[in-house]
Image (spheres, grey):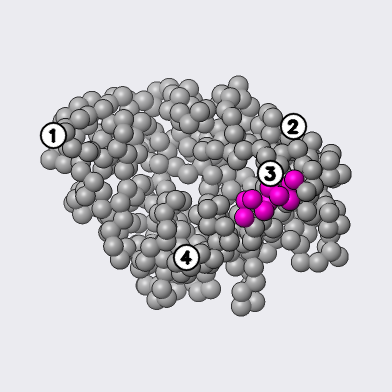
Amino acid sequence: MPDNKKRKRVVVAMSGGVDSSVAAAVCAKQGYDVIGVTLQLYKNDVVGKKKGSCCAGQDIYDAKKVANKIGIKHYVLDYEEQFKSEVIDDFTNSYANGLTPIPCVRCNEKIKFRDLYQTAKQLDASTLITGHYVSNKFMNGERALFRARDASKDQSYFMFTLKREQLDFIRFPLGDLTKEQTREIARELDLSIAEKPDSQDICFVQEGRYTNLINKLLPKSTIKGNIINMSGEVVGEHDGIVNFTIGQRRGIGYASGIPNYVIDIDSQSQNVMIGPKECLGVNQIILDEVNWLGPNEIFSKAEYENPIFVKVRSTSDPVEAKLSKKSNQILVEFKNPEYGVAPGQACVFYDSIKPISRILGGGWIVKNNNKNLN
């Protein structure tokens, strides 16, 4: 929440879901001058219709309905062009290049916490409020980012690109609540979206079939290629590397009597390498575009000396690792091998494995140092 009511104008990002609606309603109830802003990010005739999405169609209507109910100003801003160029195009191009993207991080980085952040400043707001499950609290005289109290809803993995100046301006009032507590507040305030289901998967991908979107927007990107085994032998053919991601087991299109996984994707040769699970083990990864939110400057020494724990996927637990400087990139060395680590995904840093630990930053995985591929 805003630090004091003397600076009382706040902008709330309203997606049309229960979380952002409750954030807006609580601010209004506490007497702040609330401006609700909903971003029109895409039209259904571009990406297809999908249940449980956000920021389009029914969700904009729901946000307006909540704003009218709680008596706040509400604006819909057209961000379709920005979202297409910064998020959707990045998503489709990444898959075409053999990467596994995370569009929710890019949306936070390029749209919500860059463009909307600037919009809130232009509206003379003291604070930007969102309904993310993450905490932003003072620690040793500065704002720091922490995992949400409700581990099952924690969104810290998707927030590592936040800048320090943004942390000083943005607040996350749901960070100490469970999802059920949020819904109970919505019920108490008689909000129509109290029982609305959470958005699922990627908002702009129709029914989870991302390849349909890629084929529509990048029709020439789907090139047939070979499926090869760990010895480099051709064992099959595929319809395009966009259909694969590192660690994938189902839908490979090849059966050998033992479980096979996607071990590597080569965008130059269009080859997809498959092998047994043990070949997925990764000891090191290289990170680019590293954003640091910790108390010490990560690049000040060749190696980060404090204990650090990392997550290489949103659903995993933090694991112990070591960080060191490698030119303008960061080398991450795992204490124990990690499996199914895909270039294009994020590696996020934490100061401990405790449920409410501090987010120290993160970066984008650009290379796996997989011993099985050397």
Q: Which residues are magenta?
A: 178-187
Q: Of the residues shown, which amino acid type is indicated by label 2?
A: Tyr
Q: Which residue in the protein does label 2 denote?
A: 61
As measured in the structure, the alpha-carbon distance from the residue carrying label 2 to the one carrying label 4 is 38 Å
Task: Reply above or below: 213 against 345.
Answer: above
Secondary structure at numbered mark 1: loop
Who comes first in sequence, dot 2 or dot 4? 2
Left or right for 261, reference 18? left
Secondary structure at numbered mark 4: strand
Give the label, 1 or 2, closer to the camera.
Answer: 2
Left or right for 360, reference 275? right
As measured in the structure, the alpha-carbon distance from the residue carrying label 1 to the one carrying label 2 is 55 Å
Depth check: give the residue in front, 353 or 73.
Answer: 353
Secondary structure at numbered mark 3: helix
Q: Of the residues shown, which amino acid type is indicated by label 1?
A: Glu
Q: Which residue in the protein does label 3 denote?
A: 18
Who comes first in sequence, dot 1 or dot 2? 2
- Image quarter for residue 46? top right
Q: Is residue 242 magenta?
A: no
Mark 4: few/some/many CA within 10 Å (<14, 14-19, 20+): many
The picture places residue 43, in percent across and down from the top left corner, at: 63, 27
- Image quarter for residue 141? bottom right
Q: Which residue in the protein does label 1 denote?
A: 233
Task: Reply above or below: 18 against 282.
Answer: above
**Is residue 79 something that shows in the picture?**
no
Q: Are marks 2 and 3 in contact (CB under 8 Å)?
A: no
Q: Of the residues shown, which amino acid type is indicated by label 4?
A: Tyr
Who comes first in sequence, dot 2 or dot 3? 3
Query: What is the quadrant of the N terminus in the image?
Result: bottom right
As measured in the structure, the alpha-carbon distance from the residue carrying label 3 to the one carrying label 4 is 28 Å
Q: Which residue in the protein does label 4 denote?
A: 350
